[in-house]
Amino acid sequence: MLGKYNKAKEETNAGVVPAVDFAAALGLTPVVLREGAELSFKTSAVCRPGLYLAGYEEFFAATRVVLFGSAEVSFAMSLDKALLAERIDKMFSLGIPCAVVARGIKPPAEFVTAAERYEVPLFTSSDITGKIGADISTYITSVLAEEVTLHGVLVDVAGMGILLVGESGIGKSEVALELVHRGHRLVADDSVIIRRSGGILIGRSPELIRHMLEIRGVGIINVERMFGSVAVRVNKSVDAVFELVDWEEGKNYDRIGSEDLTEEILGVSLPKLEIPVKAGRNLFVVIEAAAAAIRQKELGYSAHEELEQRLKNAKK
Amino acid sequence: MKTKLKARADLSLALAKKVTETASNCASDIRVLTGNKGANAKSLMGVIALSFKKGADLLLVAEGKDAAHAIEELKKLL
Protein backbone atom coordinates (compact mmCIF):
# COMPACT_ATOMS: atom_id res chain seq x y z
CA MET A 1 0.00 0.00 0.00
CA LEU A 2 1.00 3.56 -0.52
CA GLY A 3 0.31 4.21 3.16
CA LYS A 4 3.99 4.03 3.87
CA TYR A 5 4.58 6.82 1.40
CA ASN A 6 2.95 9.24 3.67
CA LYS A 7 -0.65 9.46 2.69
CA ALA A 8 -1.49 12.72 4.39
CA LYS A 9 -5.19 12.84 3.81
CA GLU A 10 -6.42 16.36 3.52
CA GLU A 11 -8.48 16.85 6.63
CA THR A 12 -12.18 16.77 6.21
CA ASN A 13 -13.33 20.32 6.19
CA ALA A 14 -14.26 19.27 2.66
CA GLY A 15 -17.44 20.90 1.51
CA VAL A 16 -16.92 24.14 3.43
CA VAL A 17 -16.04 27.25 1.45
CA PRO A 18 -16.12 30.96 2.20
CA ALA A 19 -19.36 32.39 0.80
CA VAL A 20 -17.42 35.14 -0.99
CA ASP A 21 -15.40 32.51 -2.90
CA PHE A 22 -18.61 30.80 -3.98
CA ALA A 23 -20.03 34.14 -5.17
CA ALA A 24 -16.84 35.10 -6.99
CA ALA A 25 -16.50 31.75 -8.76
CA LEU A 26 -20.06 31.87 -10.05
CA GLY A 27 -20.37 35.61 -10.66
CA LEU A 28 -23.11 36.03 -8.05
CA THR A 29 -24.14 39.32 -6.44
CA PRO A 30 -24.69 39.08 -2.68
CA VAL A 31 -27.97 40.49 -1.36
CA VAL A 32 -27.77 39.13 2.18
CA LEU A 33 -24.30 38.10 3.31
CA ARG A 34 -22.80 38.28 6.77
CA GLU A 35 -19.07 39.01 6.73
CA GLY A 36 -16.97 35.84 7.03
CA ALA A 37 -19.93 33.58 6.28
CA GLU A 38 -19.09 30.04 5.17
CA LEU A 39 -21.16 27.66 3.10
CA SER A 40 -21.28 24.00 3.98
CA PHE A 41 -22.18 21.71 1.08
CA LYS A 42 -23.15 18.06 1.40
CA THR A 43 -24.55 17.48 -2.06
CA SER A 44 -24.10 19.00 -5.49
CA ALA A 45 -27.85 18.76 -6.20
CA VAL A 46 -29.71 22.03 -6.60
CA CYS A 47 -33.35 22.49 -5.48
CA ARG A 48 -35.97 24.38 -7.49
CA PRO A 49 -38.48 25.06 -4.72
CA GLY A 50 -41.72 25.32 -6.72
CA LEU A 51 -43.50 22.52 -4.86
CA TYR A 52 -42.42 23.83 -1.48
CA LEU A 53 -43.77 27.29 -2.32
CA ALA A 54 -47.03 25.65 -3.33
CA GLY A 55 -47.27 24.16 0.15
CA TYR A 56 -46.00 20.62 -0.49
CA GLU A 57 -43.24 20.11 2.06
CA GLU A 58 -42.60 16.37 1.74
CA PHE A 59 -39.18 15.36 0.40
CA PHE A 60 -37.77 18.87 0.65
CA ALA A 61 -34.00 18.36 1.01
CA ALA A 62 -32.64 21.22 3.11
CA THR A 63 -29.04 20.25 2.27
CA ARG A 64 -29.36 21.65 -1.24
CA VAL A 65 -28.77 25.11 -2.60
CA VAL A 66 -32.21 26.62 -3.31
CA LEU A 67 -32.48 28.19 -6.76
CA PHE A 68 -35.33 30.48 -7.76
CA GLY A 69 -36.01 31.01 -11.46
CA SER A 70 -38.59 33.27 -12.99
CA ALA A 71 -41.32 30.62 -12.57
CA GLU A 72 -40.73 30.27 -8.82
CA VAL A 73 -40.46 34.01 -8.24
CA SER A 74 -43.58 34.86 -10.24
CA PHE A 75 -45.51 32.09 -8.46
CA ALA A 76 -44.25 33.43 -5.11
CA MET A 77 -45.44 36.92 -6.02
CA SER A 78 -48.88 35.54 -6.90
CA LEU A 79 -49.29 34.19 -3.37
CA ASP A 80 -50.96 36.08 -0.57
CA LYS A 81 -48.23 38.18 1.13
CA ALA A 82 -48.72 36.64 4.58
CA LEU A 83 -48.72 33.11 3.19
CA LEU A 84 -45.56 33.75 1.16
CA ALA A 85 -43.80 35.21 4.21
CA GLU A 86 -44.77 32.14 6.24
CA ARG A 87 -43.57 29.60 3.65
CA ILE A 88 -40.34 31.40 2.87
CA ASP A 89 -39.65 31.87 6.57
CA LYS A 90 -40.07 28.15 7.15
CA MET A 91 -37.93 27.20 4.14
CA PHE A 92 -35.05 29.42 5.26
CA SER A 93 -35.30 28.09 8.83
CA LEU A 94 -34.48 24.53 7.72
CA GLY A 95 -30.73 25.10 7.37
CA ILE A 96 -30.36 25.43 3.59
CA PRO A 97 -26.76 26.38 2.64
CA CYS A 98 -27.79 29.41 0.59
CA ALA A 99 -30.39 30.68 -1.87
CA VAL A 100 -29.89 32.08 -5.36
CA VAL A 101 -32.32 34.08 -7.50
CA ALA A 102 -31.53 33.76 -11.22
CA ARG A 103 -32.09 35.92 -14.31
CA GLY A 104 -31.12 39.08 -12.43
CA ILE A 105 -34.54 39.19 -10.74
CA LYS A 106 -34.69 41.36 -7.63
CA PRO A 107 -35.53 39.06 -4.67
CA PRO A 108 -38.94 39.84 -3.10
CA ALA A 109 -38.77 41.54 0.31
CA GLU A 110 -39.99 38.35 2.06
CA PHE A 111 -36.86 36.49 0.82
CA VAL A 112 -34.57 39.18 2.20
CA THR A 113 -36.34 39.25 5.58
CA ALA A 114 -36.12 35.47 5.99
CA ALA A 115 -32.49 35.34 4.79
CA GLU A 116 -31.53 37.99 7.34
CA ARG A 117 -33.41 36.32 10.17
CA TYR A 118 -31.72 32.92 9.69
CA GLU A 119 -28.41 34.30 8.37
CA VAL A 120 -28.78 32.34 5.13
CA PRO A 121 -26.68 33.94 2.36
CA LEU A 122 -28.90 35.17 -0.49
CA PHE A 123 -27.47 35.91 -3.93
CA THR A 124 -28.69 36.98 -7.34
CA SER A 125 -27.31 35.80 -10.65
CA SER A 126 -27.68 37.49 -14.01
CA ASP A 127 -27.53 34.08 -15.73
CA ILE A 128 -30.57 32.15 -16.86
CA THR A 129 -31.76 29.57 -14.34
CA GLY A 130 -30.68 26.43 -16.21
CA LYS A 131 -27.14 27.67 -16.70
CA ILE A 132 -26.53 28.90 -13.17
CA GLY A 133 -28.07 25.68 -11.80
CA ALA A 134 -25.61 23.57 -13.78
CA ASP A 135 -22.72 25.86 -12.79
CA ILE A 136 -23.60 25.61 -9.09
CA SER A 137 -23.68 21.80 -9.35
CA THR A 138 -20.32 21.69 -11.13
CA TYR A 139 -18.78 24.04 -8.57
CA ILE A 140 -20.02 22.01 -5.59
CA THR A 141 -18.90 18.75 -7.22
CA SER A 142 -15.36 20.10 -7.43
CA VAL A 143 -15.55 21.33 -3.82
CA LEU A 144 -16.66 17.88 -2.65
CA ALA A 145 -14.08 15.97 -4.72
CA GLU A 146 -11.88 13.77 -2.57
CA GLU A 147 -8.17 14.61 -2.36
CA VAL A 148 -5.07 13.03 -0.93
CA THR A 149 -1.49 14.23 -0.87
CA LEU A 150 1.11 11.56 -1.60
CA HIS A 151 4.86 11.53 -1.32
CA GLY A 152 6.06 10.87 -4.84
CA VAL A 153 6.83 12.37 -8.22
CA LEU A 154 4.32 12.72 -11.04
CA VAL A 155 5.64 12.78 -14.61
CA ASP A 156 3.92 12.69 -17.97
CA VAL A 157 5.80 10.00 -19.90
CA ALA A 158 4.66 10.07 -23.53
CA GLY A 159 1.15 10.97 -22.46
CA MET A 160 0.94 8.49 -19.57
CA GLY A 161 0.73 9.98 -16.09
CA ILE A 162 3.26 7.98 -14.09
CA LEU A 163 3.39 8.33 -10.31
CA LEU A 164 6.86 7.39 -9.07
CA VAL A 165 6.93 6.35 -5.44
CA GLY A 166 9.63 4.91 -3.22
CA GLU A 167 11.67 5.60 -0.12
CA SER A 168 13.15 9.04 0.39
CA GLY A 169 16.53 9.17 -1.36
CA ILE A 170 15.95 6.31 -3.82
CA GLY A 171 16.27 8.74 -6.74
CA LYS A 172 12.74 9.67 -7.83
CA SER A 173 13.64 13.29 -8.54
CA GLU A 174 16.77 12.29 -10.46
CA VAL A 175 14.71 10.00 -12.69
CA ALA A 176 12.23 12.83 -13.21
CA LEU A 177 15.10 15.08 -14.33
CA GLU A 178 16.31 12.45 -16.80
CA LEU A 179 12.80 12.04 -18.16
CA VAL A 180 12.38 15.80 -18.58
CA HIS A 181 15.68 15.86 -20.40
CA ARG A 182 14.34 13.18 -22.75
CA GLY A 183 11.37 15.40 -23.63
CA HIS A 184 8.81 14.22 -21.07
CA ARG A 185 7.04 16.55 -18.67
CA LEU A 186 7.22 17.15 -14.93
CA VAL A 187 3.95 17.67 -13.05
CA ALA A 188 4.94 17.47 -9.38
CA ASP A 189 8.03 16.66 -7.34
CA ASP A 190 7.94 15.22 -3.83
CA SER A 191 4.39 16.17 -2.99
CA VAL A 192 1.53 15.24 -5.31
CA ILE A 193 -2.05 16.30 -4.66
CA ILE A 194 -4.39 13.74 -6.19
CA ARG A 195 -8.06 14.45 -6.71
CA ARG A 196 -10.68 11.96 -7.80
CA SER A 197 -13.13 13.14 -10.39
CA GLY A 198 -15.52 10.37 -11.39
CA GLY A 199 -13.30 7.34 -11.99
CA ILE A 200 -10.30 9.44 -12.98
CA LEU A 201 -7.46 10.61 -10.77
CA ILE A 202 -5.92 13.99 -11.51
CA GLY A 203 -2.58 14.92 -9.96
CA ARG A 204 -1.03 18.32 -9.44
CA SER A 205 1.67 20.01 -7.39
CA PRO A 206 1.11 22.27 -4.41
CA GLU A 207 1.30 25.72 -6.01
CA LEU A 208 4.17 26.91 -3.84
CA ILE A 209 6.66 24.31 -5.10
CA ARG A 210 5.24 23.83 -8.59
CA HIS A 211 7.87 22.74 -11.13
CA MET A 212 10.70 22.98 -8.63
CA LEU A 213 12.89 19.90 -8.39
CA GLU A 214 15.34 19.03 -5.65
CA ILE A 215 18.42 17.27 -6.98
CA ARG A 216 20.87 16.17 -4.34
CA GLY A 217 24.28 17.70 -4.90
CA VAL A 218 22.88 20.40 -7.18
CA GLY A 219 20.13 21.94 -5.10
CA ILE A 220 16.74 23.22 -6.13
CA ILE A 221 16.17 23.81 -9.82
CA ASN A 222 13.24 25.44 -11.58
CA VAL A 223 12.44 23.00 -14.37
CA GLU A 224 10.26 25.44 -16.28
CA ARG A 225 13.03 28.07 -16.33
CA MET A 226 15.70 25.54 -17.21
CA PHE A 227 13.91 23.46 -19.85
CA GLY A 228 11.07 25.72 -20.96
CA SER A 229 7.32 25.53 -20.60
CA VAL A 230 7.09 22.40 -22.81
CA ALA A 231 8.91 20.50 -20.04
CA VAL A 232 6.12 20.93 -17.49
CA ARG A 233 2.41 20.60 -17.05
CA VAL A 234 0.09 21.88 -14.34
CA ASN A 235 -1.97 18.70 -13.97
CA LYS A 236 -2.18 15.24 -15.44
CA SER A 237 -4.29 12.14 -14.99
CA VAL A 238 -2.54 9.47 -12.94
CA ASP A 239 -2.48 6.32 -15.08
CA ALA A 240 0.03 4.03 -13.37
CA VAL A 241 2.16 3.72 -10.24
CA PHE A 242 5.83 2.73 -10.47
CA GLU A 243 7.46 1.88 -7.19
CA LEU A 244 11.23 2.25 -7.15
CA VAL A 245 12.76 -0.31 -4.80
CA ASP A 246 16.30 -1.16 -3.76
CA TRP A 247 17.66 -4.00 -5.85
CA GLU A 248 17.85 -7.05 -3.61
CA GLU A 249 20.02 -9.92 -4.70
CA GLY A 250 18.06 -13.14 -4.80
CA LYS A 251 14.66 -11.47 -4.99
CA ASN A 252 12.55 -12.48 -7.97
CA TYR A 253 11.32 -9.46 -9.90
CA ASP A 254 8.77 -9.73 -12.67
CA ARG A 255 10.86 -11.06 -15.55
CA ILE A 256 8.11 -11.86 -18.00
CA GLY A 257 5.68 -8.97 -17.57
CA SER A 258 2.80 -11.16 -16.51
CA GLU A 259 2.38 -10.01 -12.90
CA ASP A 260 -0.65 -7.82 -12.71
CA LEU A 261 0.01 -5.70 -9.64
CA THR A 262 -2.38 -2.88 -8.83
CA GLU A 263 -2.42 0.04 -6.45
CA GLU A 264 -5.57 1.65 -5.14
CA ILE A 265 -5.75 5.42 -4.72
CA LEU A 266 -9.03 7.01 -3.56
CA GLY A 267 -10.82 3.82 -4.54
CA VAL A 268 -9.46 3.82 -8.12
CA SER A 269 -7.33 0.83 -9.06
CA LEU A 270 -4.18 1.59 -11.10
CA PRO A 271 -1.66 -0.75 -12.72
CA LYS A 272 1.52 -0.92 -10.73
CA LEU A 273 5.08 -2.02 -11.41
CA GLU A 274 7.91 -2.61 -8.98
CA ILE A 275 11.11 -1.32 -10.52
CA PRO A 276 14.36 -2.33 -8.87
CA VAL A 277 17.03 0.34 -8.79
CA LYS A 278 20.64 -0.68 -9.33
CA ALA A 279 23.66 1.45 -10.12
CA GLY A 280 24.47 1.35 -13.81
CA ARG A 281 20.89 0.68 -14.86
CA ASN A 282 19.51 3.46 -17.01
CA LEU A 283 16.31 3.97 -15.13
CA PHE A 284 14.68 6.51 -17.43
CA VAL A 285 14.86 4.10 -20.37
CA VAL A 286 13.34 1.36 -18.21
CA ILE A 287 10.56 3.73 -17.20
CA GLU A 288 9.85 4.78 -20.78
CA ALA A 289 9.62 1.13 -21.76
CA ALA A 290 7.43 0.30 -18.76
CA ALA A 291 5.03 3.13 -19.61
CA ALA A 292 4.86 1.92 -23.20
CA ALA A 293 4.22 -1.67 -22.02
CA ILE A 294 1.29 -0.53 -19.89
CA ARG A 295 -0.09 1.43 -22.83
CA GLN A 296 0.22 -1.70 -25.02
CA LYS A 297 -1.56 -3.77 -22.39
CA GLU A 298 -4.43 -1.25 -22.40
CA LEU A 299 -4.56 -1.60 -26.17
CA GLY A 300 -4.77 -5.36 -25.83
CA TYR A 301 -1.23 -6.44 -26.66
CA SER A 302 1.23 -8.21 -24.43
CA ALA A 303 4.63 -9.44 -25.51
CA HIS A 304 4.64 -12.36 -23.10
CA GLU A 305 1.39 -13.70 -24.58
CA GLU A 306 2.80 -13.45 -28.09
CA LEU A 307 5.92 -15.29 -26.99
CA GLU A 308 3.75 -17.98 -25.40
CA GLN A 309 1.93 -18.35 -28.72
CA ARG A 310 5.20 -18.61 -30.65
CA LEU A 311 6.35 -21.35 -28.28
CA LYS A 312 3.14 -23.29 -28.94
CA ASN A 313 3.47 -22.92 -32.69
CA ALA A 314 7.14 -23.81 -32.80
CA LYS A 315 7.91 -26.89 -34.83
CA LYS A 316 8.70 -29.99 -32.87
CA MET B 1 4.07 8.76 18.55
CA LYS B 2 2.50 12.17 18.21
CA THR B 3 3.33 15.63 19.49
CA LYS B 4 1.55 18.91 18.99
CA LEU B 5 3.41 22.18 19.03
CA LYS B 6 3.27 25.75 17.87
CA ALA B 7 5.81 26.87 15.27
CA ARG B 8 8.47 29.07 16.84
CA ALA B 9 9.29 30.78 13.54
CA ASP B 10 8.09 31.19 9.96
CA LEU B 11 9.18 28.36 7.69
CA SER B 12 12.26 29.40 5.73
CA LEU B 13 14.35 27.40 3.28
CA ALA B 14 17.08 27.11 5.90
CA LEU B 15 14.62 25.73 8.46
CA ALA B 16 13.15 23.27 5.94
CA LYS B 17 16.68 22.07 5.18
CA LYS B 18 17.47 21.53 8.88
CA VAL B 19 14.22 19.65 9.39
CA THR B 20 14.82 17.28 6.47
CA GLU B 21 18.44 16.72 7.48
CA THR B 22 17.47 15.93 11.04
CA ALA B 23 14.62 13.66 9.95
CA SER B 24 16.82 11.87 7.42
CA ASN B 25 19.21 10.93 10.21
CA CYS B 26 16.41 9.02 11.93
CA ALA B 27 15.18 5.61 10.88
CA SER B 28 11.53 6.33 11.74
CA ASP B 29 8.88 7.48 9.33
CA ILE B 30 8.13 11.05 10.33
CA ARG B 31 5.34 13.27 9.16
CA VAL B 32 4.69 16.94 9.78
CA LEU B 33 1.10 18.10 9.53
CA THR B 34 -0.35 21.59 9.64
CA GLY B 35 -3.84 22.75 8.72
CA ASN B 36 -4.99 20.44 5.94
CA LYS B 37 -1.45 19.78 4.68
CA GLY B 38 0.98 17.04 5.52
CA ALA B 39 4.49 16.12 4.44
CA ASN B 40 7.16 13.50 4.89
CA ALA B 41 9.70 15.21 7.14
CA LYS B 42 12.53 13.70 5.05
CA SER B 43 11.32 15.32 1.88
CA LEU B 44 12.61 18.86 1.34
CA MET B 45 10.05 20.04 -1.20
CA GLY B 46 7.24 18.47 0.79
CA VAL B 47 8.28 20.35 3.94
CA ILE B 48 8.66 23.60 1.97
CA ALA B 49 5.12 23.16 0.64
CA LEU B 50 3.81 23.29 4.21
CA SER B 51 4.78 27.01 4.24
CA PHE B 52 3.63 27.55 7.81
CA LYS B 53 4.01 30.80 9.72
CA LYS B 54 5.16 31.47 13.27
CA GLY B 55 2.53 30.32 15.78
CA ALA B 56 0.95 27.78 13.41
CA ASP B 57 -0.28 24.52 14.94
CA LEU B 58 2.01 21.67 13.94
CA LEU B 59 1.57 17.98 14.53
CA LEU B 60 4.57 15.64 14.44
CA VAL B 61 3.88 11.96 13.91
CA ALA B 62 6.72 9.45 14.07
CA GLU B 63 6.62 5.70 13.72
CA GLY B 64 9.63 3.46 14.22
CA LYS B 65 12.34 2.47 16.66
CA ASP B 66 13.75 5.94 17.25
CA ALA B 67 10.42 7.78 17.11
CA ALA B 68 10.84 9.44 20.52
CA HIS B 69 14.34 10.62 19.68
CA ALA B 70 13.22 11.93 16.28
CA ILE B 71 10.43 13.96 17.83
CA GLU B 72 12.78 15.37 20.51
CA GLU B 73 15.25 16.50 17.83
CA LEU B 74 12.57 18.07 15.63
CA LYS B 75 11.02 19.87 18.59
CA LYS B 76 14.34 21.67 19.08
CA LEU B 77 14.05 23.09 15.55
CA LEU B 78 10.36 23.84 15.25
Image (tube, rainbow, N blue to C red):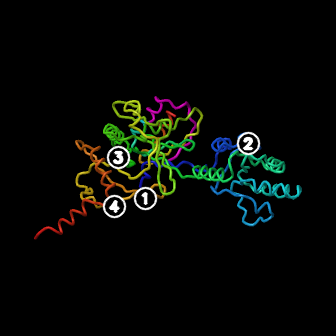
Q: Nearer the viewer, residue A206 or A138?
A: A138
Query: How packed is label 4: few (under 14 Cα within 10 Å), some, or many (20 or more)?
Result: few
Q: Nearer the N terminus, badge 3 or badge 2? A: 2
Tell me the element at label 4: loop
Q: Check if mark 1 and mark 3 are on a common chain.
A: yes
| Spatial CA span between label 3 and label 2 | 46 Å
Instruction: Give the letter of the chain under mark 1.
Output: A
Instruction: Give the letter of the chain under mark 4.
Output: A
Q: Nearer the N terminus, badge 1 or badge 4? A: 4
- Residue range in magenta is B1-19
Question: Which quadrant does the C terminus of chain A fall into?
Answer: bottom left
Q: Nearer the viewer, mark 2 or mark 1?
A: 2
Residue annotated with mark 1? A269
| Three-letter amino acid code at the position of disc 4 | Asp
Tell me the element at label 1: strand
| Three-letter amino acid code at the position of disc 2 | Pro
| Spatial CA span between label 2 and label 1 | 42 Å
Residue annotated with mark 4? A260
Q: In the rendering, at what x and y percent does residue A286 appear?
A: 27, 47
Residue annotated with mark 3? A158
Q: Nearer the N terminus, badge 1 or badge 3? A: 3
Q: Are marks 1 and 3 in contact (CB under 8 Å)?
A: no
Q: Nearer the viewer, mark 1 or mark 3?
A: 3
Tell me the element at label 3: loop
Q: Are marks 1 and 4 in contact (CB under 8 Å)?
A: no
Q: Is residue A85 left or right of residue A149?
A: right
Instruction: Give the letter of the chain under mark 2.
Output: A
Q: Does the stretch in magenta take in B62?
A: no
Q: Is residue A30 left or right of residue B45?
A: right
